[in-house]
Image (cartoon, rainbow, N blue to C red):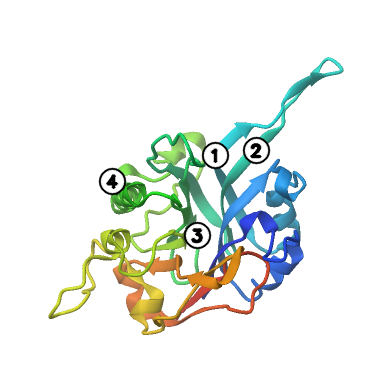
Amino acid sequence: MKFVSYNIQYGVGLDGRYDLPRIVSSLGGADVIALQEVTRGFGRNGNVDMVAALETLLPRHYSVYWPASDIDAGSSLENGRVVSRRFQFGNMILSRWPILSSRLILLPRSRTLDRLNLQRGATEAVIDAPGGPLRVYSLHLDHTYRNERIAQIAHLKERVQAYEIEGGAISGAEEFGLSQPPSPQDYVLMGDFNMTPESPEYCTLAGEADPLYGRQIRATCPVDVLAGLGKRQADSYSWIDPKNHAHRMLIDYCFVSFGLVARLQDAWVDETAAGSDHLPVWFELA
């Protein structure tokens, strides 16, 4: 099973060109895809409905999309009828296998007065994977304030670990004539975390590394697939500064729950992708 996470920057590459087929060409062979910065009604990419466009370009994948930020973008009354125009900014999951349930987890935020601060969220999907049902999260954390990222990570960890208690998207589904979705323990977190390796927010998620024993595999802390497989290097990167291409950082990650660690086969960053200012982060499970 191949997984990939890609912040697609509303379809615009470092060359300033919107090219969604170019992005999709970098996703070939992926079974489960987590995308961030998927938009509708955004002027920077011609107000395209990226959700519909991606579903057209990936017709053999099931999909769910949740816009964490949903803003009026010039709705009006035209010819006696309301025309609703909305700017939506969120995360998408696509899967070769059916998505049994989905929900949006809103992440905590605080109001800024001088910089952009969008409502952030995590799109959750329970996937009917061949090795058993699996929870997958596509997420995007705040980009300007470390304390906010730490609060968002803490909240997300609480929701992820309380999944079986809370019941996910629905429980008692039989009353509506629906099949009850499973409550899988194993999960995958993928996305743009806007954090660097071993930063305070990274350690909030993955746990501190002990000076003697290193970072341990614990039930409460997911494992960074690149680091867990020894594939993360000092010069690894997943983002390129559009204003200075020599400035590069590793801020995109894939994490897995402890039950999936033994199934990890490989992990890598696709440094050839050119469809965004970010790069796709891949991993493979047996």
N-term mark: 3 or 4: 3
Contact, CB < 8 Å: mark 3 with mark 2? no
Circle 3: is it few (<14), some (14-19), or many (20+) Cα within 10 Å? many
Contact, CB < 8 Å: mark 2 with mark 1? yes
Res 208 → quadrant: bottom left
> Cα distance, mark 2 to mark 1?
8 Å
Q: Disc 2 or disc 4, which is closer to the eye?
A: 2
Contact, CB < 8 Å: mark 2 with mark 4? no
Q: Position of residue 219 (x, y in %)?
A: 23, 64
- Identify residue for label 1: 69
| Residue 191 located left or right of residue 279 | left
> Cα distance, mark 3 to mark 2?
28 Å
Give the number of the disc on residue 165: 4
Q: Position of residue 224 (x, y in %)?
A: 36, 71
Q: Amino acid at mark 2?
A: Phe
> Cα distance, mark 4 to mark 1?
27 Å
- Identify residue for label 2: 87
Q: Amino acid at mark 4?
A: Ile
N-term mark: 3 or 2: 2
For image coordinates 36% across by 85% down, the residue present is: 230
